[in-house]
Amino acid sequence: MAKVLVADDDRSLRRILRFELAEAGHEVAEAPDAAAASGLLAGQEFDVALLDLHMPGGGGMGVLRGLRGAETGPEVIVLTAHGTVAVAVEAMKLGAYDFLTKPFHFDELRAVIDKAVEKARLRRENVALRTQIERGRAPRAIVSADPGMGLLLETLAKVAVSDHPVLLQGESGTGKELLAQALHDASPRAGGPLVALNCGALPEPLLESELFGHEKGAFTGAHARKLGLLEIAQRGTLFLDEIAELPASLQVKFLRALENRVFFRVGGIQELRADVRVVAAANRDLKALVGTGAFRADLYYRISTVTLQVPPLRERAGDVPALVRHFAEREAAGRGRSFGAAALHVLRAYAWPGNVRELQNVVSRTLLLSPAQVIGVEDLPADVREPGAGGGSQRLADIEREHILRVLARTGGQRGRAAEILGIDPKTLYRRLREAGAGGDA
């Protein structure tokens, strides 16, 4: 079934087309002139629009020009009793799907509509696929030999078959996004898109537009309608990373979308369906944030139907050798380079405050800078092989603070570069520096 707009000043023809299209299983709306057609197209989503070329108020061409460049606009079929090659060419240049001259057989029109509906569906799928590609959505393996991670993965597989929201709690760099992808791939929604949004990476206005989308003219710079990730993720999974950073006003709007299963684009008046499974991730204790009033309790309980705690790498040191081999094989591209037993022993003893992401960075950097076929202890970065870097009797917070300060010193105080090396978001680095009293406000 498709949603079709019939815009024609011939009332009898509109009624006939409405009846025939409804009989074919389509939902139909009518417009007697160009202004009414433009109004309906601005406020509702249509798969196909049948536009009469010479109706009052600017005609079908005027409506078609208004749709030009819209990523989510309908496929347009232009209808006229005065067809010419020049008019047909102009309509096609403006983006019309087809051009039919009156009178026409309904079977001919139905065949054209069916093809237009298929094209509209493929266009929506392409938008979702492009978004996934732009955001780096590519399958990656989960490498683990740790019994605790094994139990977590078993639980994840059981949860995947449901449609319940899932909250992944764990430090930055532990692989929460990778687990979200594994959950999506094992779910009934695997055929749909998986799209991700880092709630701590954008200012509030841009975050709202990214999540909900916006209409043309909704704000300065909104030159065209933009799909939000809630819309792009239809029949798939929406992964919200760093959800603790979601501003309070957007927490309210997102909660409403989850509860009512509908939402509006910024500046929009059309109610859109939110058919998504939500997987959220947080590197802070959301329940504790609820207690301080920093995060809404109702949203927390909505997204944490199932909560999985992802352990840091220091609590699963047995995973380090397997992960090192995995990253080395990927980096060395079949050249047979490896890490020796002594180097692996040092890597296992290290605290890894940046977790798996930091380990991957260290493996990549070591292979880049060392020519050795078998990596030894002397090839490892100094801050990793230093005695005592693994922690001993030191508090974990002190170890993390010292490691961050060492990386900052190496980068000459460039926090953006330090965050990249550590594998954490710059905002997370600034927050940890503030908490450690190390001048994060500068």
Image: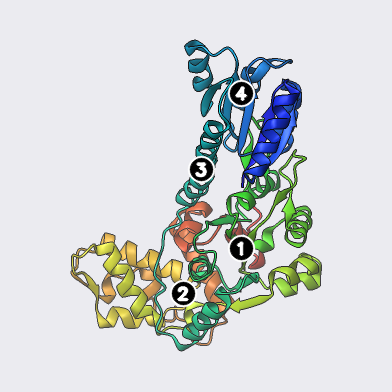
Nearer-the-camera pick, 304 or 14:
14
Distance in Å between CA atoms under marks 3 and 2:
50 Å
Sequence-first disc among 1 and 2: 2
Q: Position of residue 151 (x, y in %)?
A: 51, 86
- Tell me the element at label 2: loop
In this view, 208 is above or below 321: above
Q: Where is residue 19 in the image (x, y as percent from the top left)?
A: 70, 37
Distance in Å between CA atoms under marks 3 and 1:
53 Å
Q: Mark 1 points at which residue?
A: 433
Local packing at callout 4 (Cα closer than 10 Å; few below 14, some 14-19, many 20+) is many
Res. 218 visible in picture:
no
Distance in Å between CA atoms under marks 2 and 4:
58 Å
Q: Mark 4 points at which residue?
A: 64
Q: Mark 2 points at which residue?
A: 352
Residue 25 numbered mark, or none = none
In this rendering, which labeled residue sits more in front, label 3 or label 2?
3
In this rendering, which labeled residue sits more in front, label 1 or label 2?
2
